Structure formats: C-alpha cells, structure tokens
Amino acid sequence: MFDKALPNVHLEGMRTSIQSPIFAARMTAIRNVAIIAHVDHGKTTLVDKILHYCSLFRTNESTGELILDNNDLERERGITILSKNVSVQYKGVKINLIDTPGHADFGGEVERVLNMADGVLLLVDAFEGPMPQTRYVLSKALALGKKPIVVVNKVDKENCRPDEVQESVFDLMFNLDATEDQLEFRTVYGSAKQNWMGPDFKKPTEDISYLLDSILEEIPAPNPPEGNLQLQITSIDYSKYTGRIAVGRVTRGSLAVNQPINLMRRDGSSVAGRIKEIFIFEGLGKAKTERVEAGDICAVVGLESFEIGDTIADFEAPEAMPPMQIDEPTMSMVFTINNSPFYGREGQFVTSRHLRDRLMKEIEKNLALKVMETDSQDTFMVFGRGILHLSILIETMRREGYELQVGQPRVIIKEIDGKKCEPVEILTIDVPEEYSGKAIEQVTLRKGELQIMEPKGDLIHLEFEIPSKALMGLRTALLNATAGEAVVTHRFESYQPIKGNVPERQNGSLIALETGTAIAYALDKLQDRGRFFIAPGEEVYMGQVVGEHSRDNDLVVNLTKTKKLSNVRASGTDDKVQLAPPIRFSLEENLEYIQEDEYVEITPKSMRLRKILLDENDRKRASR
Ligand SMILES: Nc1nc2c(ncn2[C@@H]2O[C@H](COP(=O)(O)OP(=O)(O)OP(=O)(O)O)[C@@H](O)[C@H]2O)c(=O)[nH]1
Ligand SMILES: [Mg+2]
C-alpha cells in the first residue's frame, strides 16, 4: 500500500538511503601507511612500539627483541629483509602498517609495497640525517603521490641535531619536486627506543600517541576510484598448509569468498579462477574474513599460479592495473654444487637437482632475483641486486641444509645506445676528520669521484660516485684505513659508460698443497709468508685457499708437514708456537674477497675458500 502511494523515483531514493548506512558500517575507517627510511634509522623499533601501544601485548609479554624481525637471519643481523604487514586499531580506525627493509639491495621491494599505502612515515635518524636510501625511498614515495609525515627519530642520541636534520629533509623534498601538499608535511620528533613521539624534541612526551594522531589527521583515508574489482599482487606469503598467498590492496570494487575472478598476468594473458579464502591483517597475524572492500589490504588464498604484479580482476569485465616497475639485477654470481673433497659431510641437500629446485622455488617470491641455466647441469648463473641480496639467499640455503659453491660476484654490463655501461653507485662515508684524507685516498684509488664533503656533527660527511665493481673489498680497506671508524653505505644510482679498470686485490693466495690436518709447526714456519684463514688442527684439502700471501702471486704451502721424527713433539699441539689468530671472514667478506679462479664453499657449518682447479698442474695448464 505504502509502496504504491509513492512514486517510483521516491522509491529509488529510499532504497539507497536504506542501503548506504549498512554499506558505511561495513566500510571501516582505514589508514594505509608504509614506514620507510635508510637502514637502521629505527623503522622496526617504531612499528613494534606502535603494536605495543595499541595493546596487542600486555607489557609483561615484551621480550625486548623486535617481534617483527622474525626470521633467524633478521634477528642475527638486526636488519629487516622482507617487508611486513601488520595492523592496529586506534580510536576506531584501522591502521595498516607496512614495515619495509632499509638496505639498498631491497629497494625494489620498498617501491612495490608503496603501492599499498596512501601515505608514508619517513624516518630520519636525528644525528645521521638523510642518507642515500632516504633519498631513494622518499623520491619513490613522492613520485607515487604519497603524503609524507617526517619522523625525526633517535633524538635521545648524543650530539643529535634534530633541527638541522628537519631542514635538510625539507630541502631534499624540495629538490625531489614534492608537490605543495607534500611539502606541507608534519614533522614528529621522538625516540622510538624510549617510546615517545611529540611535536618538540626538547619536550619528551609520555607515549607515541602524538604520532598515531598525526597519522589519523595527516594521512588521507583510502579514496577508491569507481569501478569493478582490482587488486594488484604486491607481495607473496607462504603457508605450509595452503601454499602461496597473494598479498595486495583492493584498489577498486570488493572481493568475496567464492567470487569468480580473472587473474590478469603481467605478460598480458589472463586466467579465470575463484577466491577460496580471504584474510585481513590483524595485529601481527591474519584474520579470516568473508569480504574485503576497496581500500583495505588483504591476503588471498586459492589462486593457482600467480606472480607479483598480476592483477586480480573482475570475472566479467576484467581490467589489469598498470605493470609495476621491477628492479633489474646489477650483479651475477655462479652457483654450483659442492664438489670439494669435503662435500656431503654436513649438508642434507647436495645434488644438482636439489640446487636447481631450490633456486627455482626462490625466484617465485624473490622478484629481483633471476636464475639462468648453463650448459652444465651442476651450475647456474644467479642474478641479484647486490652482494647482500645474494648472500642472504646463500645464508638461508645453508641454514636449510644445503651445500653449494659460489663464484666471484660480477657486475652486469649493459649496452646502452651502443656504449658499454656499468652500474655506478652513490657511496657515502662518515668519518672523523683525522681519517678523511685516508678515506678519500682509498676511494679515489678505485675511480670514485668526490661529490660532496661537508661537516656533520663532529664527523666529515663524504659522498662519491663510484663504479659498483670498485666496491668489492672497499669496506674492509676503508675500515683498515680509518681504524674502524668509517661508516660506509652505498646504493645503486644508474648505469654509466664504463670508467676503466679498477685495481683488484693486491695479494695472492696461500694454497694448501695436500689434504690433511694443519699442523701448528707448519703454520708457524709459514707465518712470514702471509696471514692465515685457518687454525692448527683444522682439516684442509689440496687446493684450498688457506691464507693471504704477502706478495701478489699465489703460493702453494705445505701445512701438514711435521717436525723431523728425531724431535719428541711431532703432533699439531705444539704449545711453544706463537701463532697469530686466523682471519675469519663473514660470507659477504668472502664474496668480496675471492678472485676469478676461486670459489667460496658453503656448507651448513663451514665456509672455505678454494681454487676452482684444485690441482696445481691443472691451474698451470689453464693459465697458459
Ligand atoms: N638511540 C636510539 N636508538 C634507536 C632508536 N630507535 C631505534 N634505535 C636502534 O637502532 C637500531 C636499528 O633499529 P631498527 O628498528 O632495527 O631499524 P630499521 O630501520 O628497522 O632497520 P632496517 O630494517 O635494517 O632498515 C637498533 O639497534 C635500535 O635499537 C632511538 O630512538 N634511539
Ligand atoms: Mg627494520
């Protein structure tokens, strides 16, 4: 009756007015924020504090360690390797936070996950100020139109200079062509470590609520465009039970369980599918849900095969999102099975099949990594973004029980406009003034060009342009030249015409003559020949690199030689002998150290350097 009395138009109006409150109730208020910074400026610490503040944990649950850096390697090294999504509730608003890695080798990952955010917290260390990676991640965030909040962190540090740092961030934004709106960023000062954030660094506050309020006030809520479903897959998660999980933001439309969809691939093809399960981020974990609206970030289970960059789109009228920029590798390395005389002693996975399967599994989620087969089934060329990127993979594999050998890292040469070009990086060194001359000398020796030299607190800040290949071993050289004082960072800048040769390692290798146990007596007699990488009592094999020669050529040495039998003490436990402690390189140091004709052998418990050709005669023949 009532229905009839009303004209049609009115009815339409009523229907919408009834529907919209329900719709609004389902749409939670959301902020999507990525936390970006140079390495170690305090991102993960801050996210941890936010999780705590939003009372995800009772205070007594705090372990003191960063909950977010949750894999063994991240904990050991104190760096973030993979970006992570978490979410908190604050004043009735859901804040999705994306913690990102700060190391330059993982810059591509940061750029990708920025696609999920509407704004960024740019953290800057109140002493160090903007560093190369700050510039890089900020330029990406600005270009993508993200609204920044600047957090000047670590104001508790001695000698910090929050005002100067704030100004230099402003200058940096200006130089990076920030829009007017972006330039009107809010600055928050504080100490993530001491758990406070406020508008004034001279007045510590009680907690971090000022920062959370700033997020609600400054970062725009999602404003989804009209249109049907679009979710671009920005990262991949893995679960033992359900397999690969696609993570991304619902940019447009909505997504529901059982909904048929079309997966639009990066290569232009598409495949129909159905959504099995959807999860939204809640605290540190995920919560199952039936439906996600545009603006929220979610994880999708049940897609057959997909890659980062693919779009989950409408079934009837699918539209792909523009492809994402994916970093090209700048460095390559040979990965091969372990064929040293000591192979298989520690590892569980040692065959070429194991190696191949593991590498193929890696490229599914490690986007900047590429693997090429070679004409030997035992050997693969692996391409990555830098030494750290590749060494994290190697380290992960050895923990999983793999044995392998890797060759000298090489930069990737590209031909651009008919010219051979090589990767060039920006290198910054902060060093006490008395060592700055020596630091500059080391870098210019390797074709580095000094661009900026300015005081920074009581240090001198140096910036160079330098070919990537010249960075091999530079860190060690700089630390030696500056009594360990230099703080060194670098990040890839661009490809530039090749600058010519860079001096290589000056010293040859000491090579074991035969397989056996190294004897203290023999090591002692050889001390004036160089420095050793092994201690007495260690097993060595023929062709193993056991030390660095004091001269520039390789030298084969006999380490298993004992004293004449006439002497009583003939064993390896000769306590009269005074030996310098062996040098123990980290994996990265090893990679930067080895020569073209050498491998690093990596097993779950050991790391050795070796000649590729173990037999001296073979080496002589090959060098002819
Ligand atoms: N003094 C001081 N130290 C801090 C503060 N915030 C973090 N740190 C320390 O800085 C170091 C790096 O902190 P993280 O939170 O791991 O830095 P990050 O930015 O996540 O580092 P990556 O993920 O590797 O880029 C840790 O030793 C922290 O304890 C602070 O406000 N003051
Ligand atoms: Mg971190």
Image (cartoon, rainbow, N blue to C red):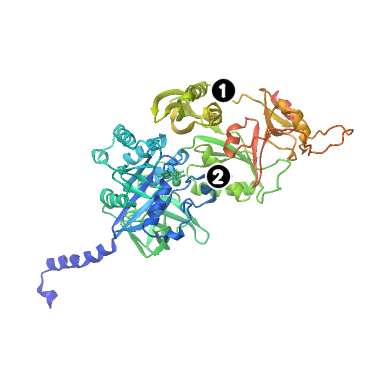
- On the image, which quarter does residue 186 sit in? top left
Identity of the residue furthest to the right in this view:
566
- On the image, which quarter does residue 480 sit in? top right
Kind of residue indicated by mark 1: Pro
Q: Nearer the viewer, residue 167 or 432?
A: 432
Query: What whole-number distance in Å separates the C-alpha atoms at marks 1 and 2?
Result: 28 Å
Residue, x 55% and y 44% (percent of image)? Answer: 393
Q: Position of residue 302 (x, y in %)?
A: 45, 60
Contact check, label 1 and label 2, Cβ < 8 Å: no
Residue, x 29% and y 63% (percent of image)? Answer: 26
On screen, residue 341 versus residue 437, left or right, reads right
Q: How many marks?
A: 2
Kind of residue indicated by mark 2: Leu
Q: Position of residue 218 (x, y in %)?
A: 26, 48
Q: Position of residue 559 (x, y in %)?
A: 77, 33
- Neighbour class for label 1 at 10 Å: few (<14), some, many (≥20)? few
On screen, residue 467 versus residue 622, left or right, reads left
Question: Which residue corresponds to mark 1?
Answer: 503
Q: Which mark is residue 393?
A: 2
Decide: is 265 above or below 599.
Answer: below
Residue, x 43% and y 23% (percent of image)? Answer: 450
Residue 622 appears in view: yes
**What secondary structure is found at the residue carrying circle 2?**
helix
Q: Nearer the viewer, residue 305 or 52?
A: 52
Identity of the residue furthest to the bottom in this view:
1
On screen, residue 501 versus residue 520, left or right, reads left
**What secondary structure is found at the residue carrying circle 1?**
loop
